[in-house]
Image (cartoon, rainbow, N blue to C red):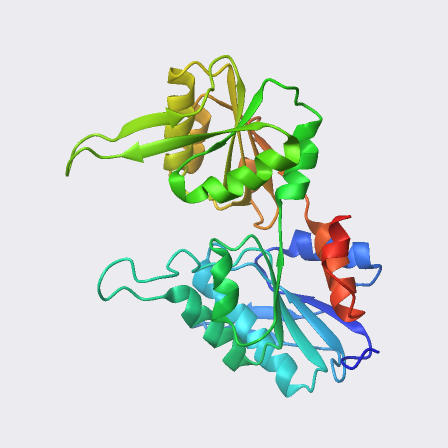
Amino acid sequence: MITHGNSIEVLAGNSNRPLAEAVAAELGIPLSNAEVGKFSDGEISITLPQTVRGRDVFIIQSTSIPVNDNLMELLIMIDACKRASAGRITAVMPYFGYARQDRKARPRDPITAKLVADILTSAGADRVLTMDLHAAQIQGFFDIPVDHLYGAPLLAKYFKKKMDENWVVVSPDVGSVGRARNFASRVNASLAIVDKRRPKANAVEVMNVIGDVKDKSCILLDDMIDTAGTICQGAQALVNNGAKEVYACCTHGVLSGPAMERLTASPIKEIVVLDTIDLPESVKSSPKIKVLSVAKLIAKAITSIYSDASLSAIYE
């Protein structure tokens, strides 16, 4: 029995309007009007022209560049819906920013992933729907339900059309081995690892490839590509070890700073990303970039949440 809002309402901030519109289209409902702007001093202004009273509200907003503005938009929209008596509020965050600081790696480090989780809860979110968190244990930072989607099935479906027995999935660093292993099992490929280390302080990094990549087609897999330093160094190491060709893929194409310059100059043949982050047209038009949509997956997840159905069934 549905015990929450009496109908679905989908709202969106400014971070990824194209994805929000595509999700609403998949659901067969219009994207609700939400006036998201700024006062002259830069403060964010939110107005909801239509009622959300008693509705099951889903606010689609990635906390991508500009991160702080997009996060504040989400928080203020949650507050507006809470004060307007929404039946339930779900923060749909295809890309969850501030996730890379998820532990105290050094003394006096903040844990920003936990901080953002607390802020979302305090603002009034009843649950969070997100995709490929930087670390899965971040789900435990929340005191509200978290539904965690995975981009691997979409990426695997794309690469399976290209693959034969001569392919290998590569983890670009030791920290991503679990993710790469799971992906390799999906596409029935072997696994390799790029091991990066410094022999001493201020020394040049030594790149070792663990596994057989000679004369193989390689897929470098990560949860995100930010400045692309790690992925490009890994690609060069694979080529140096005899790889025939190198592809790269990730869920979140952050692609900040020198990323596109590095990727363009790298030996990577194609970079496949999901549209959890709305990329500039100049990036999407690059011959090396391939963007796959997560709209259908998110729409299925929203339907499952609203109808109290199992989320695992959406991958079947």
Across and down, in percent, residue 156 comes to 65, 36
| Quadrant of the image occupied by residue 111 | bottom left
| x 63%, y 83%: residue | 82
Would residue 105 be found to the left or right of residue 261 on screen?
left
Viewer-closest of 190 and 200: 190
Q: Position of residue 14 (x, y in %)?
A: 59, 60
Q: Is residue 111 above or below residue 50?
A: above
Please report the residue visible at 62 percent of the width from the left and 72 percent of the height from the top. Answer: 127
Observer-nearest of 298 and 140: 140
Q: Residue at x 47, y 58 (%)?
A: 97
Q: Is residue 256 among what the camera can see?
A: no
Check the picture and name the quadrant holding the N terminus: bottom right
Would residue 275 be seen by someone viewing this image from the given angle?
Answer: yes
For this rendering, which residue is in front, 164 or 23? 164
For residue 27, side relative to residue 287 (left or right): right
Res. 57 image quadrant: bottom right
- Spot the residue most to the left: 201
> Residue 246: x percent and y percent?
51, 23
Residue 133 image point, x, y percent: 52, 55
21 relative to 111 in the view: left or right: right
Q: Which residue occupies 59% across, 74% down?
A: 77
